[in-house]
Image (spheres, rainbow, N blue to C red):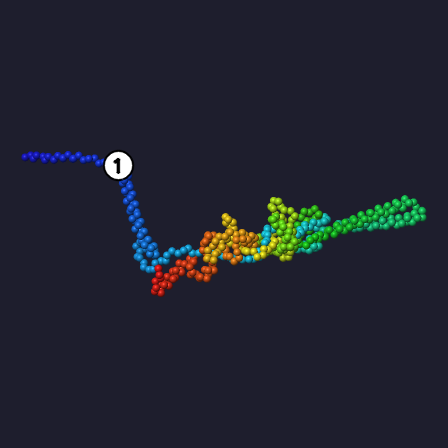
Amino acid sequence: MDRPEPQSPERAPAPDLPAPRRLGRMGRWLGSVVALLVVTGVGWLAWSLTQREPERAAGSGRPPAAAGAPARSGPPAPGPRALPPTTVGMAVVERADLPVSVEALGTVVPAATVRVRPQVSGVLQEVRYREGQTVRQGDLLAVIDPRPFEMALQQATGQRMRDEAQLEAARVTLQRFRTLLKQDSIARQEVDSQEALVKQLEATLVVSKANEGTARLNLGYTRIAAPISGRVGLRTVDVGNVVGPSDTNGVAVITQMAPIDVEFAVPQDLVGALRDAVQAGTAARALDRSRTQLLATGRFSAFDNLIDPQTGTVRAKARFANGDGALFPNQFVNVQLQLRTIEGALVVPVSAVRAGQAGEQVFVIQPDRTVTLRPVQRGQVAGDKVQIVSGLSLGERVVTEGADRLREGSRVALPADAARAGPGAPGEGGAAAGAGRRRAAGTQGGAAPAP
């Protein structure tokens, strides 16, 4: 029996639903504002929760506890302290006699330098000096072969003797003619002729004597002597060389070492002071290039009669005895020439004066250990001291070190104060250590320190 096939139930039609509406531009804008407000509120809440603990710790005087760390019990930490005073160097304004001097770079020049050249030409036979030797005036330096000059001297001597004999014979004849003239036995003309011959022979004899003297002088020139006292340089000739007056190098060079001069340039504004210094015989000092070693002490001797228009300076010279040979020719030295002395001048160290926009200034330490910046007018400088013309009084204290860390009204500390207070005294780096030792001492004694 056939069963009828089951029929699937028909699906009921779905009811009609309204289509979803999209958000407009205004809705998106409102959503963004709401989200921003929510984020801002969450951030503010987190910040307020994290700041409550530091605020409570700051109000109680103790540092905030780290997250997860147990709270420590104990006395609260001390409150904030003022900045410690700055430790500076100090000097007192004092009176002193301040020398006014001129410093210049000078060149050592010998008082005399001679290049010895032979007066006659000949073969060098001997060299009597050593290189670098100190010789005296008149000492024998070299010898030229004298034999040719000896022969010339003998020849000149013989000529002179012949002329003398001729003159003597002419004078005898003249005397005889004069006797005959008195007896009227000779003519007057012969007597006059004989007198003229005598005068001619006298002149010839004078020439012969001069020739003899020249020959003797040339013979003496074969022995070359030192014209001045000084130090001989390096030798430029050897035995056997033919030397003469036209030689460029000569036989030797002698430089006078004592006394010796130093030439230097001085500004033209000091010409009047130099004139007074020459009359007074002002002392001069020669120092080495580093100004650390005193080489010699002498006297200011002279200055030039013209001012150099290109440099505006005048050349000056000082003379030194140089008995120990400390000064050497062509050496560069620093010359100090003391012109005068300022008596009772107010002086401070050079390091105390600072250059500012308003001019020269110094930091003056007040009695309450604060500083004030005061303008000053400085004068002459001598070494590490400077004259204060106006702006400071005798006995005031000025800052010499550490002024670059100061300003008007800054509080300072002196090195002497730190030395008297000891290493644990409050100050730069010592306040915290001193407070810690005091707290430790109070805890060990059983008493808690007062907050």
Q: Judge left or right: residue 449 versus residue 176.
A: left
The x, y position of residue 343, in whole percent, is 58, 56
Number of numbered markers: 1
Q: Check the picture and name the quadrant holding the C terminus.
A: bottom left
Identify the element where label 1 is drawn: loop
Which residue does the image show at 86% across and 45% down from the upper left?
196
Front one among 257 and 41: 41
- Residue 379 at x, y percent in the picture: 56, 52
Q: Is residue 399 left or right of residue 122?
A: left
Q: Position of residue 207 (x, y in %)?
A: 80, 48
Q: Amino acid at mark 1?
A: Gly
Instruction: Note whether residue 314 is visible.
Output: yes
Q: Is residue 24 rendered to the left or right of residue 186? A: left
Report whether residue 263 is seen: no
Q: Residues within 10 Å of mark 1 (few under 14, many from 20)?
A: few
**Rendered position, 408 above or below 24:** below
Q: Which residue occupies 29% across, 41% down?
A: 33
Viewer-nearest residue: 52 or 16? 52
Q: Is residue 223 left or right of residue 172?
A: left
Front-most of 267 and 230? 267
| x and y percentages locating residue 375 in the rendered image | 51, 51
96 above or below 315? below
Residue that lies at the very extreme toward the bottom in this rendered image: 445
- Kindly identify the residue that appears in the image at 45 percent across and 53 percent down: 409
Q: Which residue is mark 1?
A: 24
Rendered-image quadrant of the N terminus: top left
